[in-house]
Amino acid sequence: MKDNSCVISGHPNMALCDMVDPYTIKAKPVKSSKAELPFICLFTEEAYQKLATETLEELDWCLDQLETLQTRNSVSEMASNKFKRMLNRELIHLSEMSRSGNQVSEFISSTFLDKQHEVEIPSQAQKEEKKKKPMSHIVGVKKLVHSSNLADSSIARFGVKIEQEEPLANELDKINKWDFNAFKAAEYSGNRPLTVVMYTIFQERELLKTFKIPPDTLITYLMTLEDHYHNDVAFHNNIHAADVAQSTHVLLSTPALEAVFTDLEILTAIFASAIHDVDHPGVSNQFLINTNSELALMYNDSSVLENHHLAVGFKLLQEENCDIFQNLSKKQRQSLRKMVIDIVS
């Protein structure tokens, strides 16, 4: 054969050009001891020239594009910016999940990214409407509406109205025992474990009678307090508070301590147990300090969370029909407050 030829794939669809129909070519296979060579495709001189011209034109176009391409950043800078944009999306998603997620996002952004303006993390202040607040305002205290006109006859057996009382009653029968299950109490009470536990303890110890606490006021305060625990915080939540309050009650009931504390000291210890983690954001003191949080600023980096729990717990007593200590003497209130601060701090 004198015509130019090229070797192409044995599959007809893999032909290099469509100028020659591979099915019309009668090519004889070349015998080999190892394998058979693919069949031969024949091209004319004109076809070769046309293919070469088109290839050169495409290469010229590619070179023109490369010459006109301009970049202001190096490859490493572009890769870094790409990573930051990806991280930005993840942090925005994290910040929208919860309050602690927003704080974690801001911390990662400020700590590990050298140019924070490149990462647009929405802060908590940007999410909420900015308002000027006096420095006496305690962060975390919310205005909640609970019935303040509960008659003694309208108060539920365990302080909250539930459809089925028996499962909860069976669990609260263990209020004086160590095998009490706070998780079951939360389930049976419609996620009101702190309210039902505290109400039961106060009745068990006759604290309402001793300190002349109106039942409706106690219920209103307990529900308001419980609403200031965050359900999206895994550990320091209302179930944990109920568990600690019940454990304190059992501990104070042991024979060795039965006659050690006064009624006021018992009231103080149980109250401190109930408020000891209220409005906990789910992060540590050191995290709040390192991120220059509003709480750390307010409490001067000193026992930030402990001071905040105390402030919120006492501040809620000032809400409508929430002052459960209204009938204590001035001396008793001062003594109780001092002891609660010592316990929680």
Image (cartoon, rainbow, N blue to C red):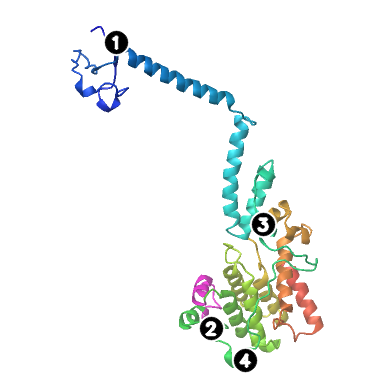
Outermost residue on the bottom side: it is 153
Residue with the mark numbered 3: 284
Chain part drawn in magenta: 172-189
Would you say 202 lies left or right of 52 here? right
Residue with the mark numbered 1: 4
Residue with the mark numbered 4: 151
Amino acid type, callout 1 = Asn
Total numbered labels placed on residues in the image: 4
* Residue nearer the viewer, 178 or 223: 223
Mark earlier in primary sequence (3, 4): 4
Could you tell me how far apart the alpha carbons at marks 2 and 1 are, in whole angstroms? 96 Å
Mark earlier in primary sequence (1, 4): 1
Residue 37 percent location from the top left of the image: 24, 16
Image disc number at residue 161: 2
Would you say 264 lies left or right of 223 here? right
Residue 24 percent location from the top left of the image: 20, 21
Amino acid type, callout 3 = Ser
Q: Are marks 2 and 3 in contact (CB under 8 Å)?
A: no
Label 1 or label 3, whichever lies nearer to me, is 1
Q: Quadrant of residue 197?
A: bottom right
Label 2 or label 1, whichever lies nearer to me, is 1
The residue tagged with tag 1: helix, strand or loop?
Answer: loop
